Image (cartoon, rainbow, N blue to C red):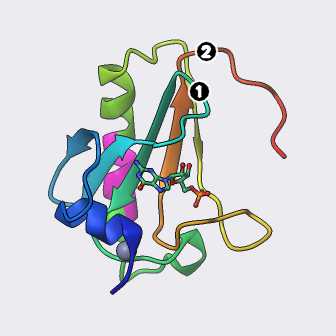
């Protein structure tokens, strides 16, 4: 499958790894929007959060178990934001489910 994040998970495309376990992989965004900008992806190809279901939700749960560990390792004790973009209106550019962790500064209240 021609998927950028599947290739990053497999190591075919290099990335700056932050965390990895059996279910998920986390790496630094190539175009950071905050001092800390990490992408967390499940190690199975799920197109977006719009297709989360009983058959793949274990991977999503494991991603959310990993996020606090990653936040602690990045010293985000003052808080952070987790975002997932879905489809065209959500401006999803990579069609492999990913959660952005943004932090390291006071983020804006704006959500759009
Ligand atoms: P989306 O817009 O789909 O929510 O987020 C995709 C993210 O992937 C963007 O923030 C973009 O900067 C990041 N990205 C795109 N290509 C690469 C890449 O090759 N390596 C890394 N580390 N991040 C990438
Ligand atoms: Zn993929």
Mark 2 near mark 1, Cβ–Cβ under 8 Å?
yes
What SS does tag 1 mark?
loop
Report if residue 30 lies within the magenta region: no
In the image shown, does 21 or 39 lie closer to the viewer? 39
Q: Which residue is mark 1?
A: 34
Distance CA(mark 2)–CA(mark 1)? 7 Å
Q: Does 24 sit above or below residue 68?
A: below
Disc 2 element: loop
Q: Residue at image x 29%, y 22%? A: 73
Quick check: 13 left or right of 89? Answer: left
**Residue 15 appears anywhere in the view:** yes
Q: Nearer the viewer, mark 2 or mark 1?
A: 1
Q: Quadrant of the N terminus?
A: bottom left
The magenta stretch is 60-66
Earlier along the polypeptide chain: callout 2 or callout 1?
A: 1
Q: Is residue 61 above or below residue 95?
A: above
- Whereabouts is ligand 2, in terms of quadrant? bottom left
Magenta-span inclusion, residue 65: yes
Residue labelled with disc 2: 105
Q: Which mark is residue 45?
A: none
């Amino acid at each position: 499958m021609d998927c950028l994040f599947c290739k990053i998970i497999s190591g075919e495309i290099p990335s700056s790894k932050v965390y990895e376990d059996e279910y998920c992989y986390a790496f630094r965004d190539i175009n950071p929007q905050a001092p800390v900008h990490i992408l967390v992806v499940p190690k199975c190809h799920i197109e977006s959060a719009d297709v989360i279901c009983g058959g793949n939700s274990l991977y999503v749960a494991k991603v959310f178990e990993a996020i606090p560990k990653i936040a602690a390792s990045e010293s985000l004790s003052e808080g952070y934001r987790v975002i997932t973009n879905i489809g065209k209106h959500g401006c999803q550019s990579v069609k492999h489910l990913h959660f952005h962790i943004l932090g390291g500064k006071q983020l804006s209240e704006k959500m759009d």
